[in-house]
Amino acid sequence: MCTMLRADDYPALVDFMRKCLYQDAGPTFEDAIRVWLLTGEQSIQQVVQDIDRLLSNGHSKSDLGEFVEKYSDYSEDGGAIPTLRRIQDVLSGTA
């Protein structure tokens, strides 16, 4: 099932990306992500759940790429999907 990618559908993820994933948030991508760990378990889980929904909603790679590019100065090699998975891994403590 493919649905139009709307930032309003992923509010926790967009809030996280706007607040943490900009150039001066941390010297590395992981450091920028870890800033969010201070917000508490519920906030972390909301971002992880938004990423799960985003990746399972059948959005095209180009739409995902535009989404990540719009809200983040950081990215992983391979594009949006590896970038989103890396965010999940760091927030979940598996990175």
Image (spheres, grey):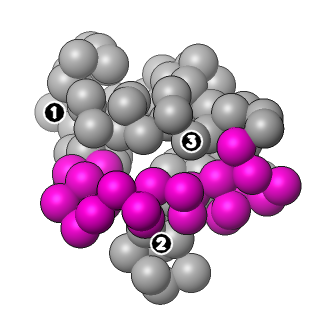
The three-letter amino acid code for the residue at tag 2 is: Asp
Question: Does the magenta stretch mainly form a helix, a strand or a loop?
Answer: helix
Front of the two marks 1 and 2? 2
Mark identifier at residue 1: 1
In space, the residues marked 1 and 2 are separated at their CA atoms by 25 Å
The three-letter amino acid code for the residue at tag 3 is: Cys
Local secondary structure at mark 1: loop
Front of the two marks 3 and 1? 3
Q: Range of the magenta residues?
A: 25-49
Q: Is residue 78 above or below residue 1?
A: below
Residue found at the far front of this picture? 38
Which residue, given by chain and number where applicable, does mark 2 sit on?
Answer: 89
Query: Which residue is at 78% across, 38% downward?
Result: 24
Where residue 67 appears, as percent x and y from the top left, is 50, 24
Where residue 93 appears, as percent x and y from the top left, is 44, 81
Local secondary structure at mark 2: helix
Residue found at the far right of this picture? 27
Query: Which residue is at 56% across, 41% downward?
Result: 20
Would you call the spot at circle 3 few (<14 residues within 10 Å), some (14-19), or many (20 or more)?
many
Q: Earlier in the sequence, mark 1 or mark 2?
A: 1
Q: Is residue 54 above or below residue 69?
A: below
Where residue 4 appears, as percent x and y from the top left, is 26, 15
Front of the two marks 3 and 2? 3
The three-letter amino acid code for the residue at tag 1 is: Met
Q: Earlier in the sequence, mark 3 or mark 1?
A: 1
In space, the residues marked 3 and 1 are separated at their CA atoms by 30 Å
